Each structure stands twice: as C-alpha cells, then as structure tokens.
Amino acid sequence: MKKGKQQRKEKQQGFGPNQAALLLIAIIICELAGFVGSVFTAPNIAGWYEQLAKPDFRPPNWLFFPVWTILYALMGVSLYIIYTSKDRMRTAALYAFGVQLFLNVLWSFVFFGMRSPFYGLVTIVLLWASIAYMIFKFFGISKAAALLQVPYLFWVTVAALLNFFIFLMN
C-alpha cells in the first residue's frame, strides 16, 4: 500500500501534460509581451529610428527579432520554474517578474511609440534594475531560473547603452 502511494506521488511530480501546458503558457505570456512591444516598435523602425544618429556598435536591425524571441522563450522557461516551485518566496519573485515584464513593454512604448530617447533611457534604467532584482529573487529559489535571465540582462545592458548614445547623439 505504501509503495503504491509513493509511485502515484512520483508520477504526479513528473513532467506531464499539465506541466507542459504550464510551460507553454509561461512562454506564450512572455512572447505576447514581446508582441505588444513590437506593436510600438515595428512601425517606427523604417522611418523615425533609421533617421536617428546611432553609435557604431549598434547591432543590425535584423538581429533584434531572433534575439528577443529567444530571450522571451528563456524568460518563459524561467517563469515556469519559479511558478511551479514550492518555495515560500515564490510570490515575491513572481511580482518581480511581473514588474520587469511591464517595464519591458513600457520601454518599447516610450522609446518607439512616444519617440522619446530620454524617457526611454529612464525606463530602461528602471528595467535593468528590475531585471537584476528579479534575478536576485529567482536565485534564492532556483539557480537555473536565475541563470536563464542572465542573457536577458546582458541584452538589456546593450540596449541601455544604445539608448544612452542615441539620446546623446540626437
């Protein structure tokens, strides 16, 4: 009898259809944030953004879509890990995740939608700090979830530098 309960418990803890659905939902949430941001970004690339003076180190425009798509997927996996954890600090970590995701979308709106490099810079500094804080919160729950966010922090660092120089140059 005890062996049967243990086997059922192990089966419930495996990666089944419910966990796969949760993982997919977490990734979709993050990719949707990227889509919302692109609503403000895409229409302004060819016109307004291309006319701005930019530093030589800027990545080519074609690189942004695949990089962000991968980063949002990694964010989704990280979100899934934290969401499914049993850690008592999970709620605070999820709030930190929500704040940075909101700021991520807000930056696209401010920089591209409002066409404001200055307020974009203010927003991306807040975004960078919120990502760093989220990584700190995630690290206490899951090192893997935290490490999955490091490429995102790196890319936002590059974006912040780009935003800073665009602000200075225009």
Image (cartoon, rainbow, N blue to C red):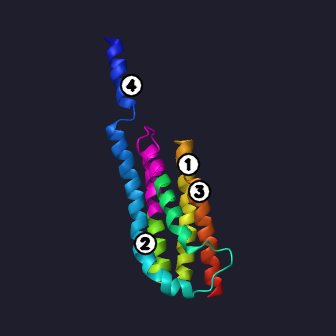
Residue 163 among magenta residues: no
Along the polypeptide, which appears first: circle 3 or circle 2? 2
Q: Secondary structure at mark 4?
A: helix
> In the rendered structure, which amino acid carries the disc numbered 3?
Pro
Q: Which residue is mark 1?
A: 146
Q: Tell me if mark 4 has few (under 14), some (14-19) or many (20+) residues whose alpha carbon lies within 10 angstroms of its own.
A: few
* Alpha carbon distance from label 4 to label 1: 26 Å
| Magenta residue span | 76-101
Sequence-wise, which precedes: disc 4 or disc 3? 4
- Quarter of the rendering occupied by the N terminus: top left
Distance of label 3 from label 1 (alpha carbons): 10 Å
Mark 3 vs mark 2, CA separation in Å = 20 Å
Number of the front mark, 4 or 1: 4
Mark sitting earlier along the chain (3/1):
1
Residue 124 in the figure: left or right of residue 95: right
- State if disc 1 and disc 4 touch (CB < 8 Å): no
| Real-space Cα separation, disc 4 to disc 3, in angstroms | 33 Å
Q: Kindly identify which residue carries mark 4.
A: 10
Q: Name the residue rendered at 63%, 68% in the picture.
A: 158
Residue drawn at (46%, 48%) of the image = 77
Q: Nearer the viewer, mark 1 or mark 2?
A: 2
Residue ID for mark 3: 151
The one nearer the camera, 156 or 48, is 48
Quadrant of the frame with the C terminus? bottom right
Q: Quadrant of residue 95?
A: bottom left
Which circle's residue, 2 or 4, is located before the other in the chain?
4
Picture quarter containing residue 59? bottom right
| Residue at the spot of label 2 | 38
Res. 11 mark: none
Q: Residue 37's spot in the image, x, y percent?
A: 43, 70
